[in-house]
Image (spheres, rainbow, N blue to C red):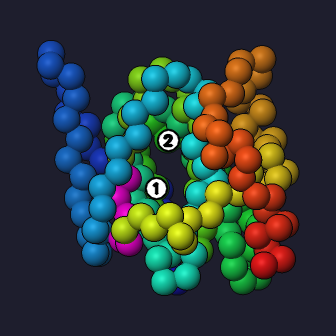
């Protein structure tokens, strides 16, 4: 199994804005773009199970995020890794990790490639508050600000419920 890896992409800026070339390796089959209007937008903790498990190659195009991953298997199950990523920085997330991020700036854009197509039948969302370290990280950055979260993520399953399955 591959391990998580932080990386930096070159960012070229001029009077028009920014250009970030992203070098691809492996077998990426889908490109996703997350455009976040507000700071303190939470997306996660998401992953796919079974034959549709995904690795992700995440790059911050604009803005800043706190990226969190949670190990879902083996001796390190439940272990959390936290990364602060800014424009041009990214993270490789292997299969068997739940992934989520919190935006720190309005207008944050995150690109990510996956090596398996999206499958609603195989998708799992774990509630961020059910993983104590993730809850602590999100709350420490949130302060008195309002969290922007989808209905789906707000009613996600508890981490312990996923583990027991």
| Residue span colored magenta | 112-116
Specify whether residue 139 is painted magenta: no
Q: Position of residue 75 (x, y in %)?
A: 76, 82
All told, the count of numbered labels is: 2
Q: In the rendered view, would you say 131 is above or below 122?
A: above
> SS of the residue at dot 2?
strand
Q: Are marks 1 and 2 in contact (CB under 8 Å)?
A: yes
Q: Nearer the viewer, residue 45 or 104?
A: 45
Q: Circle 1 sits on which residue?
A: 91
Q: Residue at x 78, y 17 (%)?
A: 144
Q: Main secondary structure of the magenta part?
A: strand
Q: Nearer the viewer, residue 33 or 59?
A: 33
Position of residue 59 measured from the top left corner of the image (x, y, whole percent)? 38, 47
> Is residue 117 visible in the rendered structure shown here?
yes
Q: Quadrant of residue 101?
A: top right
Q: Name the residue tied to disc 2.
A: 85
Say few, some or many: other residues with alpha carbon within 10 Å of mark 2 (under 14 / 14 to 19 / 20 or more). Answer: many
Position in image of residue 87 (x %, y %): 38, 35
In the image, residue 19 above or below residue 76: above
């Amino acid at each position: 199994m591959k391990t998580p890896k932080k990386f930096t992409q070159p960012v070229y800026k001029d009077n028009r804005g920014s250009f970030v070339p992203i070098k691809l390796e492996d077998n990426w089959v889908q490109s996703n773009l997350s455009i976040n209007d507000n700071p303190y937008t939470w997306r996660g903790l998401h992953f796919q199970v079974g034959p549709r498990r995904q690795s992700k190659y995440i790059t911050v195009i604009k803005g800043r995020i706190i990226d969190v991953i949670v190990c879902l298997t083996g001796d390190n199950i439940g272990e959390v890794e936290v990364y602060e990523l800014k424009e041009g920085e990214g993270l490789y997330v292997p299969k068997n990790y739940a992934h989520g991020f919190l935006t720190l700036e309005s207008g944050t854009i995150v690109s990510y490639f996956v090596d398996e197509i999206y499958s609603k039948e195989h998708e799992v969302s774990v509630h961020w508050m059910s993983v104590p370290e993730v809850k602590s990280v999100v709350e420490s950055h949130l302060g008195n600000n309002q969290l922007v979260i989808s209905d789906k993520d707000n009613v996600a399953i508890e981490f312990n419920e996923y583990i027991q399955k």
